[in-house]
Amino acid sequence: MWMRMLAGAAALAMGLAVSLAAQQGAPAADPVRAKSDAIHAKVLTLDTHVDMRNGDYGVLTPGQKVDLVKMQQGGMKGVFLAVFVGQRPAFDAAAYKAAYDSAMRQFDALDALTQKTRPDLCAFAASPAEVERVAKTGKRVIMTGLENGYPVGEDLANVKAFYDRGARYISLTHSGHNQIGDSSSDRNPPRHGGLSPFGRQVVAEMNRLGMMVDVSHSAASTFWDVVKISKAPIIASHSGCKAVHDVDRNLDNDQLRAVAKSGGVVQIVALGSYLKADSPERAEAIRTLREELGMPAGGRGRMGGPPAQSMSPEQQAEAQKRRAAYMERMRAIDAKFPPATLKDFVDHLDHAVKVAGPDHVGIGTDFDGGGGILGFNDASEAPNVTAELVRRGYSERDIEKIWGGNLLRVWRAVDAFAAREGKAAR
Ligand SMILES: [Zn+2]
């Protein structure tokens, strides 16, 4: 029965991939598309950063950029569904506990998805070997990381608590300075001027356990502290290049080279405002829309309101409706004032490859956290990325590395460090 189900899932996946290639306006006569689709079907495609949602991942969900159906349609084999807790202003035991509990509820939801609701379509992987094993079954590979170290609080043991729930990276900060380090996006004066003393312990503990240290959202000061003290390769799970578009969230060329030198990988983000400046008209239209829907200004993809876990079913339905309305209105804005496109995204990727080398670049979309651009707006459009890479002359070997090979190499190195020196120490 088990084998038959697997065979069925694999056949379904193959059928969908074929029909999708036809649907996506890929005339069989287009030799680039034929070649890129063949490569896309072969390589292990991993996305290192998608925000976890509460919905049913097993059905096509409008208003959600990643679900298991879209992944299958787009030949996306694996995804890190990031557990995310927003930065709050308080740094006390009660605030930390609330953040920790919120994170744990999201880990519970992940377990429910992979073990109870959709074990036929996906499975959780906590190591590179498990990723490869699950991918071979035709099921989608679900992995996770923690976006924002705030829920760690000031208790180092919580790093292991999250590791034990399956988190394999922690983005040390989010949009505000926290107890671990300074953020790239906080307009307030620096809190620590880099990593805090506790933050240094967190990095050491992550090295010890075999968790990838994620510098996306970190201030440059925090980034350079991490580079100095991390004994294992580091990652940026979703970042762009400052030399292509100068915003605080992106990495400059020295940072790209430093990640490469650590043996790590920069996963290029597909979030429009990190890729390209909005025209004033587009910015104004988005501001107006967000005001009308009562959403926080500048929150990009985030919808505001209480965390989904603490909503009543009615509130959740209302939030879902609001999200659908937002997506529909955003489509109209996109049509009128074009945002960043697939080409802008691959320009960042190209630049990172030129500066850091093809062994140190990957893809982390930030879908369902604000990511999504014209031509690569959800997981089903992933084949367009491979087509653009082929058009720009990337070899199959480099495409394989960029889509997942590099990340798995880094993950293995981080694991190897932990096995060799980390877990034995202490
Ligand atoms: Zn983020």
Image (spheres, grey):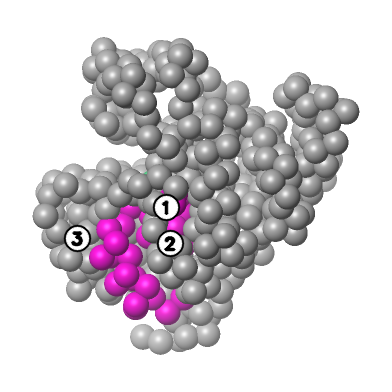
How many residues crowd around disc 1 within 10 Å: few (fewer than 14), some, or many (20 or more)? some
Q: Is residue 265 left or right of residue 72?
A: left
Tag 1's secondary structure? Answer: loop
**Where is 372 relative to 158, above or below?**
above
Report which residue position mark 1 lands on. 243
Q: Earlier in the sequence, mark 1 or mark 3?
A: 3
Q: Are marks 2 and 1 in contact (CB under 8 Å)?
A: yes
* x 36%, y 21%: residue: 282
Amino acid type at mark 1: Ala
* x 47%, y 68%: residue: 257
User: Can the viewer see residue 319?
Assistant: no
- Percent from the top left, x then y, of residue 92? 11, 54
Corner quadrant of residue 18: top right
Report which residue position mark 3 lands on. 179
Q: Is residue 421 left or right of residue 137?
A: left
Q: Which mark is drawn over residue 253?
A: 2
Q: Would the CB of label 3 be found within 8 Å of ligand 1?
A: no
Q: Earlier in the sequence, mark 2 or mark 3?
A: 3
- Furthest toward the right, the residue is 29
Corner quadrant of residue 121: top right
Q: 367 or 348, which lies in front?
A: 348
Cα–Cα span, label 1 and label 3: 30 Å
Q: Is residue 172 magenta?
A: no
* x 27%, y 15%: residue: 288
Q: Which residues are magenta?
A: 215-241
Q: Which mark is drawn over residue 148?
A: none
- Percent from the top left, x then y, of residue 178? 20, 56
Q: Is residue 217 magenta?
A: yes
Amino acid type at mark 2: Asn
How many residues crowd around disc 3 within 10 Å: few (fewer than 14), some, or many (20 or more)? many
**Where is 132 relative to 33, above or below?**
below
